[in-house]
Image (tube, grey):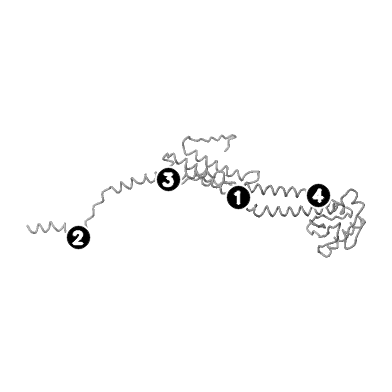
């Protein structure tokens, strides 16, 4: 095409088969739009393949039967309603699984973690009181107790390095009732220390001795915040469980519409089948009323008929 501008005209003839062809294109566009989108894709796409016509339906459409268009629309609507019902049933099964298994497990785990966080916070609360963490300090590393912060930080780094040398992980000390274990992360090339009492808390160990102690203090100070977050998560899980129980009890909201349209579709199919049979019946009756063809005489009878005139001439 060498033209700078091109105009495209689309024509549709009223009361013709064009409307159905555009309907198919519309359904295809809806189907493609569910995939080609910048948003998160949907879990299930509607089935639009049921819009295809059979040769018998096209032949009936050409005769101008008003029931054909209604049947096509009902076929599509019933198919969509059945798909919606199947999705509703699948969602109901998922909710039943969540109610019976997933939510109880998550709620139990959240309760146990919340109790552990509260217990750990009560244990570390005296240490976090204003000025207490600076006045009193005690850390056990490698079986030796340290009261000097810098010395304990240096001993902590040395203990981690010792575990790396023997390529193992294990307990290296204790800090206010929290057991300290260390390991070397070979992938990220760094030391990790885990403080455990009721719950576990991980920190990264650097080269600064005092900086490592500050990291430990920050982690212990954040226990109260973690407890509040776990409490909120627990309440959310309990609310989701109640909502799931309400949703699983709801029936398919368009069940009556599906039943009515399915019944109407069955009536239309019966009418169309009856009309098709009525067209074929007169042809069969006409063929039955035709006179049967005369039987062809046998060869023996033909010979007798041929010999009869000859015998009569001989007698005269």
Residue toward you, 266 or 69: 266
Helix, strand or loop at label 3? It is: helix
Q: Which of marks 3 and 2 is nearer the N terminus?
A: 3
Residue 281 at what x, y percent from top left?
35, 46
Q: Which residue is drawn at 19% across and 60% down?
A: 300
Q: Residue at x 81, y 49 (%)?
A: 224
Residue picked out by circle 4: 224
Mark 3 → mark 2, Cα distance in angstroms: 56 Å
Q: In this view, does 205 lie above or below 246?
A: below
Mark 2 → mark 1, Cα distance in angstroms: 84 Å
Residue picked out by circle 1: 92
Residue picked out by circle 2: 300
Helix, strand or loop at label 4? It is: helix
Q: Earlier in the sequence, mark 1 or mark 4?
A: 1
Q: Are marks 2 and 1 in contact (CB under 8 Å)?
A: no
Helix, strand or loop at label 2? It is: helix
Residue picked out by circle 3: 270
Disc 3 vs disc 4: which is toward the camera? 4
Q: Which residue is drawn at 11% across and 59% down?
A: 311
* Quarter of the rendering occupied by the C terminus: bottom left
Residue 265 at what x, y percent from top left?
47, 44
Mark 3 → mark 4, Cα distance in angstroms: 71 Å
Q: Are marks 2 and 4 in contact (CB under 8 Å)?
A: no
Residue 117 at what x, y percent from top left?
79, 53
Q: Which of marks 3 and 1 is nearer the N terminus?
A: 1
Q: Can residue 115 be seen in this view?
A: yes
Label 3 CA crowd tier, 10 Å (few <14, some 14–19, many 20+):
few
Helix, strand or loop at label 1? It is: helix
Disc 3 vs disc 1: which is toward the camera? 1
Q: Is residue 152 above or below residue 79?
A: below
Q: Are marks 3 and 4 in contact (CB under 8 Å)?
A: no
Q: Which of marks 2 and 1 is nearer the N terminus?
A: 1
């Amino acid at each position: 095409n060498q033209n700078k501008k091109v105009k495209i005209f689309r024509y549709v003839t009223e009361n013709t088969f064009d409307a159905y062809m555009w309907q198919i294109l519309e359904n295809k566009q809806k189907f493609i739009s569910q995939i080609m989108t910048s948003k998160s894709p949907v879990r299930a796409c509607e089935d639009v393949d049921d819009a295809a016509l059979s040769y018998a339906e096209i032949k009936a459409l050409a005769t101008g039967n008003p029931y054909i268009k209604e049947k096509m629309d009902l076929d599509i609507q019933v198919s969509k309603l059945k798909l919606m019902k199947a999705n509703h049933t699948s969602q109901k099964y998922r909710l039943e699984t969540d109610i019976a298994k997933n939510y109880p497990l998550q709620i139990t785990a959240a309760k146990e973690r919340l109790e552990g966080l509260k217990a750990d916070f009560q244990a570390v609360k005296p240490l976090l009181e204003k000025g207490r963490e600076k006045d009193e300090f005690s850390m056990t590393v490698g079986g030796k107790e340290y009261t000097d912060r810098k010395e304990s930080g240096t001993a902590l780094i040395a203990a981690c390095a010792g575990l790396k040398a023997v390529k193992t992980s294990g307990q290296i000390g204790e800090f206010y009732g929290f057991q300290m274990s260390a390991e070397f992360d070979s992938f990220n090339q760094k030391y990790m220390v885990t403080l455990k009492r009721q719950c576990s808390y991980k920190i990264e160990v650097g080269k600064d001795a005092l900086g490592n102690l500050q990291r430990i203090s920050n982690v212990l100070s954040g226990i109260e915040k973690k407890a509040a977050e776990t409490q909120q998560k627990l309440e959310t899980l309990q609310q989701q469980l109640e909502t799931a129980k309400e949703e699983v009890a709801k029936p398919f909201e368009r069940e009556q519409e599906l039943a009515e349209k399915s019944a109407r579709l069955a009536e239309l199919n019966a009418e169309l089948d009856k009309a098709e049979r009525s067209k074929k019946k007169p042809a069969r009756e006409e063929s039955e009323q035709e006179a049967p063809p005369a039987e062809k005489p046998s060869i023996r009878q033909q010979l007798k008929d041929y010999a009869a005139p000859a015998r009569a001439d001989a007698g005269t």
